[in-house]
Amino acid sequence: MSEHRRKPPQPQGGGRAAARRGQSGSSSGRRAAPRGATGSPADSYGSSSYGSGSSGPGGEERSYGSRAEARRAAQRGSRRRGADNAGPGGRRGAPGGPTGPGRGRGRASTAPGRKRLIDYPRAGKYGWRRWVPSWKLVSGLFIGFVGSLMAVAGIAYAMVSVPDEAAVAKAQNNVFYWSDGSVMVATGGEVNRQNMSYASIPREMRYAVISQENKTFETDSGIDPNGIARAVLNMARGGQTQGGSTITQQYVKNAMLNDQAQTLTRKVKEIFVAIKVGSQVPKDKIMEGYLNTTYFGRGAYGLQAASRAYFNKDATKLDPGECAFLAAMVKGATYYDPAGATSLDPSATPEANSRRALAQMQDTLDKMVKYGHLSPAERAKYTTLPKIQNPRANGQLGGQIGYLVDLAKAYLVNNPATHITADDLQKGGYQIYTTFDKKKVNALEAAVKNVQKANIKPKQRPKTDTYVQFGGASVDPTSGAIKAIYGGEDATKHFTDNADSTGAQVGSTFKPFVLAAAMKWGVRNPDGPESQAQDERTIASPKSLYSGKNKLKIKEYNGKVWTDKDGNEWLQTNDGGESVGNAPDYKIDLREAMQYSVNSAYVQLGMDVGLDKVQQSAMDAGILKGSLASANYPSFSIGTSDPSALRMASAYGTFAASGQQRDPYSVVKVSDKDGVIFTHQDKSTEAFTPQVADNVTDVLKTVVDKGTGTKAQLPGRDVAGKTGTTDGNKSAWFVGYTPQLSTAISMFRLDDNAKNKNRTFLEMYGTGGQEKIHGASFPAEIWHDYMAEALANAPVVNFPTPQPIGKVLNADPSPTPTPSASQSQTTSPSPSPSASEPSTSPSPSASQTCNGWSWKCGTTGGTNTGGTDGGTSPTPTVTDTSGTGGNTRGNGNGGIFGGPTG
C-alpha cells in the first residue's frame, strides 16, 4: 500500500479519544505499529501486560513482526483479568487497563457490587462457559423442584380418601330388552357378590394370589415404582395403560369402579390412594378387600361368589388346587375359564382355555411351594383341573335366553362403534335393546323340539340318535336384524351356541354362491390366461348347459384335466352315484342342476369361473373368510366350508334383498345413566346387482317349487331355498327365505363334551329311523314349521321378476336334456335306492316307469337320496393313471378326495 494512504501518527495524550486512537489494529483489525515505534498508550500508562507496541519486561521495547502477531498478543493480554480490571477513574476499558488497547472486551463484566438473584447467563464467563449453569444454580433449582413436588404430593395425598369397597365395588344389572321393548332378562351384580372376613378366607387362597400376583405383599409399601414407570411410559407412547403391579394397587383399582377411565389423571390418583391405603390400612384388611372386590369371571365379584360360580361350594371349603385355579381366573376369565368364551374371542375355545388354566394353576402351585406357602407333598395332589360346574347356573339364562344374551354381548364387544368393552359389560349399568323377536324365538325353539321329540329317540336307538343337535338362525334381509336363533337345547346345559358357531360343513347350500359368481364375473375364456379381466369373460345364463354325469372327470377352465400335486385326477360323484341328463354327455341346465342338486355340474362350473371368484362371491354375500375351506380343490364349490347358521341366513338374505348385503346385528341401541350411548346405523353394500341376485333367487325358487326342497313350501308365498348334505352324512342343512325373512337350519351329531379332546362329527346313517339324513328331511321340516308361524300375520310379498342375464353356454346339444331313464344309461352304475327308502327325487332305476323329465314321481314326501341333496356326499373318487386306487387323503370330516363312504 502506498504511503500516502497511511494515516499519519496520532499525537500522544488527549484523554480517552487519544487512548482509543492509540490502540493498534491488533484487536480491531488495524495495522500494527511500525517496528521500533514507541509511545503507545500502554507505554504512557506503564502497563505490565504485553500489547501491540508495548514494552517487555524491564522496559525493553517489544516489537512484532506482523499484524497477525500483534493481534494474538493483544488477545493474550485481553484474557488477563484481575483486580486491576478497571483503568484510572474506575472506568472499565480505559487506557492502562488489563485489556490493553483492545476495545470492548471488558463490557461483559458486571459492575462492582451489582449482583443478580439468578446468575444466568453467568457473569464474568465467556464463550460456552457463560451458558453452563453453576452448581449453586443447579442445586437450587433441584431443591426447589423437589420441594414443589413434595408440596403438590402432600396436597394430593391429603385430598384422596381410602376407598370403601362395600360402597362402590358393586356390579350393576345389565337389562336386556326384546324387540318390542319388553324386558327379556336382567343380569348383573345383584347376586354376584358376598363379602368374606379375612379369617374366613382360606390361607391357601391368600397365598395363591400373593405367590402369583405380588410375592412381597406382606412387606412392601403398597406401590411398585417400576410398575408405575412402565405404565406411565406405556401411556406416553400411546399404548394401553397397565394394571397395578401390587395387590394394594389392584385392590384400589377394583374399589374405584366409579372411575374406570384409563387416563393418566386416574392413574396418578390411583397411586396416591394406594400410598394412603398402604400406610393407613392393615395388610389383612387390604387382602380381605382385594378378594372381596376382584372379578373372577362368570359375573362373580369376590371369592365367595366365584367359589359358587365355579364349584358350587362355600369358599371356606376350597382346597389348594381350587384356590390356585381361582387365582388363574384373576388373570382374565375370558381366556382361562374352561367353559370358553368364543362369543367374545374366537380363540377362547374350551380346549385352549383349559390348557391355559391348567398351566397357570400349576405355575401358581409351584410358586407356593417355592416361597414356602405349600408343602411339596400337598402340591403333588393337584395335577389336573378341578371339577367345574357349568357357567350358566343362573336360571334366568335357561332355554334360549343365555344364547341371546351372549350374542348381544359379543356384538357390543366386537363392534368398535359401541366403545363398550367386556370389562364394561361386566361392571353393568346398561340398558340393551335387542333385535330379538320373542314370538319368533319361541316359534323356532318349538319347531326344533317338536321334530326332535317326534323323531330322535336316543334311548331306543343309542347308536344313531345320541348327540343329535340342531342349530338355527333367522334374519331380516331388509335390515340385517337377527330375529331369532336356536343355539341348543338349553343354555345352562349346552354351552356352544349352534346358531353362531358349529363347524358343520354346509354342503350343497353353497352352490348358489357358485351360480352368483358365474353371473357376476362370468366363465373364463378357455384360450385366455388363468387370470382374466371382466371383458374377457362370458356371463353365464341359468340356461347354460353342464354335464350331470356321475364320476365326471373335472377339467380346468382351459380343458386340461385337473390333477392334484400328486398327479391324481378328480372324478366328481353325485349323491347316490347317479348320472343326470341324456347319455352320452348328460347335459343339464344350471337351473335343473340346482333343482336336483347335481354335484358334477356345479363343480365344473366353479372351475370355469375360478374358485377364487367363487370364494369372493361367498364373502361378498356375507360369509366370513375364516369359515371358508381351502379354495384349492374342486370340491370347494359344493360346500366343504363351515359357516355358522347365522352367517348362512344372512348371506341368503343378500339374495332376498336383491343383492344388498348387510351384516347381521343384534342390538338396536344401548343406554346408561347418562342416556343413549349407541344406536345402530343401517349400512349396506351392493354385493350383487339386482339382475344377478334376482336370477339366483328365481333358480332357488325352483328348488322349493319342484326340486329337493318341496317340504319347505309355504302355500300362497314365494319361497326360495336350498338343501344340503355333506360327506359321510355328518350334517344336513336347509337354508331358505322369503322377501321378509331368511332362515338357516342345521342338523348334525357331535359329542361336545369338553373333556373329549378329539371331538368329531358323527355319521347320521340311521338317525331318526331314516337310512340317511338329508337337508330335505328334518331341517326342511323345521324350517317350514317355524316360518309358517313366524310369518302367520305378515303380508304376502312376492320376489321381483328377474331380468334376463348372460349367455347360454355349451348350448349344443339341446338345452332341454332329460335324466337317464335307467341305471344302464349312467357311465358309473351304482345301486339304486332300495324300495323301502323314501326319496324326494332319486334318479329312476330301470324298473321305474317315470320317463323323460318325469321327476315328480319322487318329489312328494320322504327323504332325499341320490343326487337330490348334493353337497360333498359322497366325496369324489380320485384315480391315478396307474390304476392303483383312490386317494383317501382327508380333511378330518370325510376327506377332500373322499374314497369309500361306507
Image (tube, helix red, strand yellow):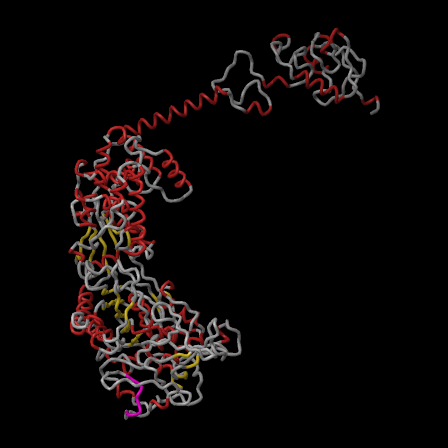
Tell me where residue 610 appears, x and y as whole percent: 45, 73
The quadrant of the image that shows the C terminus is bottom left
Residues rendered magenta in the picture? 841-847
Residue 490 falls left or right of residue 775: left
Q: Nearer the viewer, residue 835 or 802?
A: 835
On the question of residue 484 being in view, the answer is no
On the question of residue 559 being in view, the answer is yes
Q: Quadrant of residue 492?
A: bottom left
Tell me where residue 759 appears, x and y as whole percent: 29, 63
Tell me where residue 307 appears, x and y as whole percent: 19, 46
Q: Specify whether residue 846 is painted magenta.
A: yes
Question: In the picture shown, does residue 109 fall above or below 506?
Answer: above
Q: Residue furthest front?
A: 377
The quadrant of the image that shows the N terminus is top right
Tell me where residue 414 appears, x and y as whole percent: 32, 55
Q: Nearer the viewer, residue 182 or 901?
A: 901
Question: In the picture shown, does residue 157 fall above or below 845?
Answer: above
Question: In the picture shown, does residue 446 fall above or below 671?
Answer: below
Q: Specify whether residue 425 is painted magenta.
A: no
Principal SS element in the magenta part?
loop
Q: Quadrant of residue 73?
A: top right
Circle count:
0
Question: In the picture shown, does residue 243 fall above or below 557?
Answer: above
Q: Quadrant of residue 66?
A: top right
Q: Nearer the viewer, residue 609 or 769?
A: 769
Residue 692 falls left or right of residue 407: right
